[in-house]
């Protein structure tokens, strides 16, 4: 009987562990910080953030191990502002597996330059949806930022599998913005903090005016990338359809952050995808990509000529 109870407990524990959504890797770099600060602090922070992301339940769905979303958070600490308070740059990368292949397609590759936080060694990373700012804004800012990007990753992933599937997670990201910590040196949560920050990401993905954005994600991933093995020609046409959605959106809304956001980390994938396309389709794709992804226009012009 005792052995049976132990086995049942082990199975329940295994089920709980597999239920979480993320397979997240966190890297904390602090090479620019003076040597008087113990490097153990940053190793402890790395472990705490990894546990925070991977052990917390973010949705009501149960994920199998192979279904977990692979993502990487690189926190590059650039300055000690005051004792236990740091300024950093956060890079967030997430990928989505493509059906019937071993390939993973990038779904987020974003750099956030507005990260200021307080951390004391062995401090628990806490996040409470009903009290996001907490009692110490600088300390709670760290968990709020990581929670925000987790909800954005979930929203993008769900959007890529079903039409408007990510709406509830984009709303959660917006709730984090609305309840975000407010204090000295804390930026990135307000409209006036800049044009490329967390506020505008949440605004773009929740604004009904930009519904074509969600259509583009579904067409690109579910109807396009996932169908490459089954029907490559039709899959490419679906990717063209996704680009047309974004082009319509861009025409009506110049310099929209979410359109720039879509293309981050995708230029190699897109160039390779359309290299094998028929000449007319290749030209169409090249023109759209040069117009939409200006930072990589020269690459598309060269590789898709």
Image: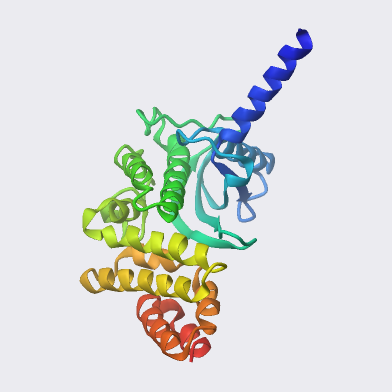
Image x and y of residue 276, in percent: 54, 83
Left or right? Give the position of 54 relative to 155.
right
Q: Is residue 183 visible?
A: no
Side of 3 where 114 appears, left or right: left
Name the one closer to the observer, 58 or 52: 58
Specify the quadrant of the image occupied by residue 197.
bottom left
Against 16, residue 263 (above or below) is: below
Residue 204 x/y as whole percent: 29, 56
Question: Which quarter of the picture shows residue 175?
Answer: top left
Farthest right residue in view: 3
Image vertical order of residue 139 relative to residue 165, above or below: above
User: In the rendered view, does 42 fall on the left or right side of 207?
Assistant: right
The residue shown at (38%, 45%) is: 186
Q: Residue furthest front?
A: 230
Q: Residue at x 45, y 59 (%)?
A: 222
- Can residue 257 be seen at all in this image of the molecule? yes
Q: Position of residue 164 (x, y in %)?
A: 34, 51
Q: Indicate the quadrant containing the N terminus: top left, top right, bottom left or bottom right.
A: top right
Residue 60 against residue 10 in the figure, above or below: below
Q: In the image shown, does 162 or 152 lie closer to the viewer?
A: 162
Q: Taking 74 as reference, is 143 above or below it?
A: above
Q: Quick one: 176 or 107, which is closer to the camera? A: 107
Q: Residue at x 43, y 49 (%)?
A: 158
């Amino acid at each position: 009987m005792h052995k049976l109870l132990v086995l049942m407990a082990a199975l329940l524990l295994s089920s709980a562990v597999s239920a979480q959504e993320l397979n997240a890797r966190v890297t904390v770099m602090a090479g620019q910080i003076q040597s008087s600060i113990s490097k153990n602090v940053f190793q402890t922070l790395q472990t705490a953030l990894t546990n925070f992301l991977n052990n917390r339940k973010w949705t009501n769905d149960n994920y199998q191990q192979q279904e977990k979303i692979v993502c990487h958070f690189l926190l590059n600490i650039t300055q000690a502002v005051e004792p236990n308070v740091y300024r950093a740059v956060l890079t967030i990368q997430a990928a989505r597996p493509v059906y019937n292949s071993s390939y993973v397609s990038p779904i987020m590759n974003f750099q956030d330059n507005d990260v200021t936080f307080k951390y004391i060694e062995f401090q628990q990373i806490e996040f409470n949806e009903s009290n996001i700012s907490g009692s110490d804004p600088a300390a709670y800012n760290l968990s709020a930022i990581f929670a925000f990007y987790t909800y954005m990753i979930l929203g993008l992933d769900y959007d890529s599998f079903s039409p408007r599937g990510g709406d509830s997670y984009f709303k959660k990201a917006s709730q984090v913005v609305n309840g975000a910590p407010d204090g000295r040196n804390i930026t990135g949560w307000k409209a006036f903090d800049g044009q490329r920050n967390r506020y505008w990401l949440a605004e773009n993905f929740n604004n009904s005016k930009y519904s074509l954005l969600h259509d583009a994600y579904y067409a690109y991933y579910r109807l396009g990338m996932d169908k490459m093995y089954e029907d490559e020609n039709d899959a490419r046409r679906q990717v063209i359809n996704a680009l047309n959605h974004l082009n319509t959106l861009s025409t009506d809304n110049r310099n929209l952050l979410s359109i720039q956001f879509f293309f981050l980390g995708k230029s190699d994938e897109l160039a390779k995808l359309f290299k094998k396309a028929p000449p007319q389709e290749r030209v169409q794709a090249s023109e759209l990509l040069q117009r939409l992804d200006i930072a990589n226009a020269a690459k598309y012009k060269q590789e898709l000529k």
